[in-house]
Image (tube, coloured by chain):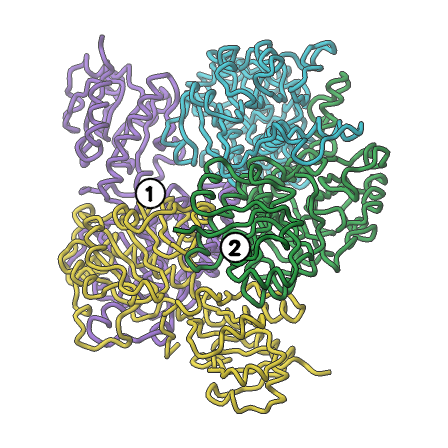
Chain colours: A yellow, B purple, C green, D cyan
Amino acid sequence: MTRPLVLSAPEPRSLDLIFSQTARDELHDRYDVLDVAPKDIDSIHEENLADARYIIGQPALSRATLAEMTGLRCIFNVESNLIDNMPYDDLFARGIHVVTTGAVFAEPVAELGIAMALCLARDVLEADLAFREGSELWGGAGNQSSQLLSHSNIGIIGFGDLGRALARLLVGFRAEISVYDPWIPPSMLTDAGVNPATLDTVLQSSDTIFVVASVTAENQGFLNAVSFKQMRKGARLILLSRADVVDFADLMAAVRSGHILAASDVFPEEPLPSDHPVRGLKGFLRSAHRAGALDSAFKRMGDMVLEDMSLIDQDLPPMRCKRAERETVFRLRSKPVTTN
Amino acid sequence: MTRPLVLSAPEPRSLDLIFSQTARDELHDRYDVLDVAPKDIDSIHEENLADARYIIGQPALSRATLAEMTGLRCIFNVESNLIDNMPYDDLFARGIHVVTTGAVFAEPVAELGIAMALCLARDVLEADLAFREGSELWGGAGNQSSQLLSHSNIGIIGFGDLGRALARLLVGFRAEISVYDPWIPPSMLTDAGVNPATLDTVLQSSDTIFVVASVTAENQGFLNAVSFKQMRKGARLILLSRADVVDFADLMAAVRSGHILAASDVFPEEPLPSDHPVRGLKGFLRSAHRAGALDSAFKRMGDMVLEDMSLIDQDLPPMRCKRAERETVFRLRSKPVTTN
Amino acid sequence: MTRPLVLSAPEPRSLDLIFSQTARDELHDRYDVLDVAPKDIDSIHEENLADARYIIGQPALSRATLAEMTGLRCIFNVESNLIDNMPYDDLFARGIHVVTTGAVFAEPVAELGIAMALCLARDVLEADLAFREGSELWGGAGNQSSQLLSHSNIGIIGFGDLGRALARLLVGFRAEISVYDPWIPPSMLTDAGVNPATLDTVLQSSDTIFVVASVTAENQGFLNAVSFKQMRKGARLILLSRADVVDFADLMAAVRSGHILAASDVFPEEPLPSDHPVRGLKGFLRSAHRAGALDSAFKRMGDMVLEDMSLIDQDLPPMRCKRAERETVFRLRSKPVTTN
Amino acid sequence: MTRPLVLSAPEPRSLDLIFSQTARDELHDRYDVLDVAPKDIDSIHEENLADARYIIGQPALSRATLAEMTGLRCIFNVESNLIDNMPYDDLFARGIHVVTTGAVFAEPVAELGIAMALCLARDVLEADLAFREGSELWGGAGNQSSQLLSHSNIGIIGFGDLGRALARLLVGFRAEISVYDPWIPPSMLTDAGVNPATLDTVLQSSDTIFVVASVTAENQGFLNAVSFKQMRKGARLILLSRADVVDFADLMAAVRSGHILAASDVFPEEPLPSDHPVRGLKGFLRSAHRAGALDSAFKRMGDMVLEDMSLIDQDLPPMRCKRAERETVFRLRSKPVTTN
């Protein structure tokens, strides 16, 4: 009995990275898996093209190759940022799903975001450095600028998987959470327990702002000097999605001036030049795009892929991964990662 | 019309520290407030003694003085650690409440505890320090020992106000929380959504352990080398209550050996000698007893005092502050603070 | 300036039913609205066809008419059960969304479901009827078969909007909730705080079972005598979706035998013949398809339609309403209602 | 080795009622249990009096007998309404705890309260009765006065264990809950996620009001015609604590007039005369003091008793049961039950 064919081209991921051993065994048990170098996908045997039910990865696909893939049902983009290297119109017209597994990063990124917010609110790093040197201040003397997250005003810009994960982690803090996301209807934000708000309101009324919006064709650098000036004195901005949504020079200037504090997991260039001024910037907490890249997150990708394959095998739509949408696939601009 | 008399002896706090302006106005509006130096309380005018309905503070009280305080209803200990400087037996026999306001610290201490746990789990400090120096590791390479709090095993030792605040803040993390507290019946822990457990179970099965037990006559140093050895390799211990519940040298040794990571807000001596070895200990995150001492926390003390005075004025029992108990008042050994 | 055109054919609903006055005003403010009798849609002016951006309703559409509707972006099916009266393949190929507003019923239906479950568990009706007649039993004597929902085992069959609403309403009851839904990957159930389970497990291990599965081509009558026999003695089955998912005669027999109790909002025929045996069946609680049909629910439909029109007007995908899916549109078999 | 002595006088309960077999075994394993008829307690052997560490029950105790009970530590009142039949002043002065186990009823009573509220809001009973007779109204036609609990305004009068259980069960309904309880400081209500409110506010702004206040010396009949008139037209009052807190004739009049709907588990006399007018009152849902009296609730009493005995055996204060308070013990007036 023939098993359905899966074309595997998960670069820059690897099957080893994204499947646990158990999941890997299940994959091979249920499917024939053909490893393909992404660049070679147009040249594989036409019978394999016709047989392929799934692609794991985001290889460039020509219109002609796609036309030969008559049994294709779903492309599992496990890098998770959509790039414009396949004929999406044909895919959508034929009802071939293109799905991404980026949701696995929501929880780890949100946890690091909370860590950063708490560190800035309580001056955790500098207090430890002072303690190492014997210059620590005890008790209230060391808390002059400390604030609580509990009962504070928190803003979230962008309410996809990551924004939702943040709101969930914050439940116990009983904060007032305001969200700006023009892609989501207000009543869905209300249903999620957060307050729909304009960008201006979020900027002006938050003690902590988490920036978790994807980069799109329209929103590059939309957070800039004017935005940061609107923020409360001493407020904290935590940048977790992509550096391109902020004017990074303006952000550094706002921190340097002492108006706000900031933390970021993402930077204009990655890796960043060794002489980049953010490295020495006081009031700025840095993390080298480490927020999501946990092994446990990667391994969940394989589980998600298997769950959705299982649904599609039963002629059901995928539910677990996130579908690319006709309306937005060409508007998204988050750069894919090159390392895991 | 005479207002009830309050004797004010809040040292080391002050009324200015613990009352907001609004609360302070309300206090003076509702009561006559007589400031008394704690050492002078035995020598104040006997008429004032007879009139006093409340004491704010924890002044030493002789049996004779107390006997003269015929209208006394409640002592509000705003330092919040009970010391053996008044005839508690008489107080209890007469039904005079002695209450503490330490609950105000639960939320800020719990937040710092979560900050510490996340910092250790994600190596936030060292990653930033490396970034400053240009030696940061990007993406997964910088995450080799990172772990999530979400869905992890968390242990809490001691389940008073602080333990409860931790469990509440952690709700969104959907962790499995096990609690050891021999003073609390198991079904109350279950009701609170945590798992009652033995100390051994907590030690052996937790990825993160929060130590928030009060010091008692029986538990000094009960967490020692044997305990730390039981912990999972790489697990994290966060000490937030008092240093006396651990054998601090053993804790440092367990961290130094690389077996566990630790963070602490409390130390065997405070302030700590400048040459104390914990200052340079890698894998140990330090905070100089700053966890609770936020101005917003102190101000809540005054609100609590007023709310309970209001109940007692109506011949109702106090509810907001925590009552000293006959059974435990002489067993508690947490040292009072000397600075705020 | 021309406003986009909306074709209005909401029968059996009406715009008055589904729009509040405020929403209605907004609709007319933002759009030109052309009322069309559903049967006349093929014969309206071709210019109007070309201009129409939205349809409110589920009129039969021929392939030819659809081809003329070159600007059509979304069909808002406000009855909310999809019937096979339009060329879905063309719609999907062109990326025209077909969306339903049935989610508005989830909360009112779930509330009635909880009411029914509690009534059966506590014998609320018969206890009141006995009280009217003076034959009530006082205290524990009247509680011989009473059970709590709290901490009990609850099964949910089908986990769409309604199943999710049930799980949410039940949060405070801290029950163990097991869910059978073969269209949803197990990890999504786990994320929602419920236990994924087989149908057999749900049947055998639940004290209360909520049946909220849609009728599909495959599942008609899938709950039958064999299923009910698997249920615990005295367990309760609450039927809220459509009668066709159960063998209704078998269900009545299982109740008549005393093995289980049941409640239902839906019936094999609606209205039901006046001599139908379920009318007199002891142990069976009846509601005449009233669970969702609240005015407040209908009014939310209009709000949802406006929110999604607003997104689509900005070239974004609809988010608020539920999309018909290629894979399932022809499998769904829930009969539309004929009255509101 | 001698085991501590327990005097057992649990009438009107019995040890069989309140202890599961496992708990009963544990009781006898840990303690010597001497059964005493409540009326005989003054005449038991003085050695037994001196040895008794615990009493289960609420027997009348003379001052002289109590003086002989030199080892007494705690009286477990398992009926749970405190009556004035023992020298409470002596008990309090000596630090002998008097505790009640009424908390076991909170969850079952709250569940019945929710059932009643939902039944009235959705007309569940009358709709079923109409269905039996073939006069049911289908769909929206049968829903003219239906309302949701979700997102509605809910008032709770009295916020003890039962009020808290109600608030917890209602969490998933995301209602706005206002609470009137003059014995509890406002900030504790806020902490519990409800809004502190005056009685007038609760009456005027609630769609559903749960009356769960204990009867005290001051509050008998405090809810009367004036109160009910303040309620919203069509609002629902659910009476769950004791009939004495309302003027029952006024309540019936308010329901009879059609202004409000009501449900009650408690009545001015229990059992109630067979000709009492509430029996035939339309718009009034009746339950014969059955709300709490579930076997599973009674069995939790024994567990609670054992847990607190275990604490007291370790010289710790009881935590699980509720302590009688000097200030309130003589103000409480809820009549004990005579049957279980």
Mark 1 to mark 2: distance in Å?
48 Å
Question: Is the C-beta separation of discs 1 and 2 under 8 Å?
Answer: no
Q: Please state which of residues A164 and B303 is positioned toward the viewer in this rendering.
A: A164
Residue at x-position 48% and y-position 69%: A101
Q: Which residue does the numbered mark 1 point to in the structure image? A: A151
Is there any visible trace of residue C47 in the rendered image? yes
* Residue C243 drawn above or below residue A17: above
* Residue C167 drawn above or below residue B302: below
**Where the C terminus of chain B falls, by quadrant?**
top left
Side of B89 where C77 appears, left or right: right
Side of B36 where B77 appears, left or right: right
* Residue D287 drawn above or below residue A43: above
**Where the N terminus of chain B falls, by quadrant?**
top left
* Mark identifier at residue A33: none
Side of B2 where A66 appears, left or right: right
x, y (%) of residue A259? Answer: 16, 53
Q: Do labels 1 and 2 share a chain?
A: no
Q: Please state which of residues B39 and A111 is positioned toward the viewer in this rendering.
A: A111
- Identify the secondary structure beneath mark 2: strand
Q: Please state which of residues B312 and D282 is positioned toward the viewer in this rendering.
A: D282
Residue at x-position 67% and y-position 56%: C180
- Identify the secondary structure beneath mark 1: loop
In the rendered structure, which amino acid carries the disc numbered 2?
Ala
Q: Which residue does the numbered mark 2 point to in the structure image? A: C52
- Can you tell which of label 1 and label 2 is closer to the viewer? 2
Is there any visible trace of residue D87 in the rendered image? no
Side of A302 where D35 appears, left or right: right
Q: Please state which of residues D260 and B259 is positioned toward the viewer in this rendering.
A: D260
